[in-house]
Image (cartoon, rainbow, N blue to C red):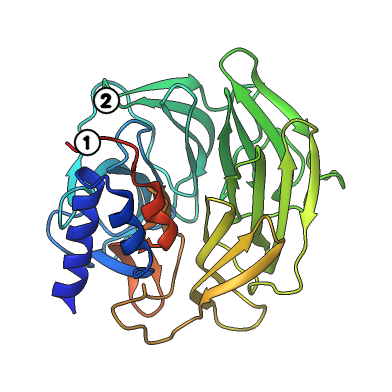
Amino acid sequence: YQRRVRGLHLAYSFMLSSVRSFFTLLFVASVIAIWVPLIQDREPGSPSPRYYHVSTTDGTNDNHMYVFGGVTYDGSVTSVLNDMWLADISASPPVWKQIPFTGQVPPARGYHSGVLGSQGQWLIFGGKTEQLPSNTFYNDLWSFDFASLTWQLLVPDDSASSPRKRYWHSAVSYQNSIYVFGGYGIDPKYPGIGPMNDLWMWNSTDGWIELFANGTDLSPPPRQGHSAAIDNNGNMLIFGGQQLLNGLNDLWSYNFASGVWTQLKSTILPPPRSGQSGTVIGTKFWLFAGSLVPQGSPEVYHNDLWYYDLSANMWTQVQPDSSAPAQNQPWKRKAQSAVVIYSSLYIFGGYGLFQGLKNDLWVYITAVSYTHLRAHETPE
């Protein structure tokens, strides 16, 4: 089996780099829609196992997946990270490389957000440490330049104009701005702590601007641990999360042009959860994994795969939960990171049910992936 899935990824990598034939792509698209394990847990040369980290591409090389920060555990002490790694997925198997930094570096953290800005920079906001009983919470904003491998502090921690300190929020990038929604707020300058539903915008011209205040009934209910993505029509999608211990499974759309929130409803719904991956591929919003802590009950983990069809306004379950998945489905987990490359979904790490922290790398290759493989380009 390992030879077969490695062979699939080798063929996939070959197509990414050299195949440009439409008919070849059409044939492959008709036969593959599968999870492929690219790097197993604890393989030498991988980043340390972690969860509550972030991932991105660099916007120029679609064969690169970057990972920054997160929470780790060495068997006795829980700590946070501020290292960065690159996975070269054009290699078979993919190869991890640690990114060397020069100059200042953001303090280590988990539960932060990371989005690719309009200028190709990686923007990191908020998060917290994990040193109980005294955590440190952040509302600083950092920018990482992939060309120079340097960090720049754009907005210092505790700046008066910044959103309140928070963690497990969401962030997206649209045109020349980033948008931060919700999360768990904790800041001595503001009364009360807990899940929020405020919406903030930042750009290099205007700085931080509050679009919706916390507590408004014009936004989705307050939450943390939700997922967010941008669809092809210029809307921000928000799914799930939790209000303290109350799990959510609602889906909302925010239109940047009108400034209006709309709930997207369906007769079929995924189970409530937080710490899931939410990404857009084509006209579908894809949802993977996550967990829920029911009041008075053990935590429930997922490894199911769903998509919401934005044209049909309906959820579809692609793959159900499995408590004993074979090697064609990732183990149940939460707080992994995810990126979309050539319309395929890549996930890294997370916290696995009965397995603890993970550092495995998987790809879900869909039929639509191969219609996006630069078929219009000439062979190399």
Residue 106 percent coordinates (x, y) = 38, 31
Residue highlighted by disc 2? 149
**How busy is the neighbourhood of tag 2: few (under 14 within 10 Å), some, or many (20 plus)?**
few
Q: Is residue 284 above or below residue 113?
A: below
In the rendered image, the vertical position of residue 119 relative to residue 100, given as above or below: above
Image mark for residue 234: none
Residue at image location 45% in from the left, 21% down from the top: 119
What is the distance, in whole Å, between disc 1 and disc 2 at their CAs? 8 Å
Q: Secondary structure at mark 2?
A: loop
- What residue occupies the far right of the structure in this picture? 217
**Looking at the image, is mark 1 or mark 2 earlier in the sequence?**
1
Closer-to-camera residue (366/297): 366
Q: Which residue is mark 1?
A: 99
Q: Residue furthest front?
A: 23
Quarter holding the C terminus?
top left
Q: Quadrant of the N terminus?
A: bottom left
Residue at 50 percent of width and 28 percent of height: 141
Residue type highlighted by circle 2: Leu
Residue 133 visible in the displayed image:
yes
Q: Secondary structure at mark 1?
A: loop
User: From this viewpoint, which residue is outermost toward the top?
Assistant: 205
Q: Residue at x 66, y 55 (%)?
A: 310
Q: Is residue 5 above or below residue 123?
A: below
The amino acid type found where label 1 is placed reads Ile
Indicate the position of residue 235 as horizontal and vertical percent values.
67, 41
Q: Nearer the viewer, residue 264 or 198?
A: 264
- Residue found 41% across the figure and 62% down from its top: 367
Q: Residues within 10 Å of mark 1 (few under 14, many from 20)?
A: some
Q: Quadrant of residue 213?
A: top right
Q: Give residue 230's quadrant in the image.
A: top right
Which residue is nearer to you in this view: 367 or 96? 367
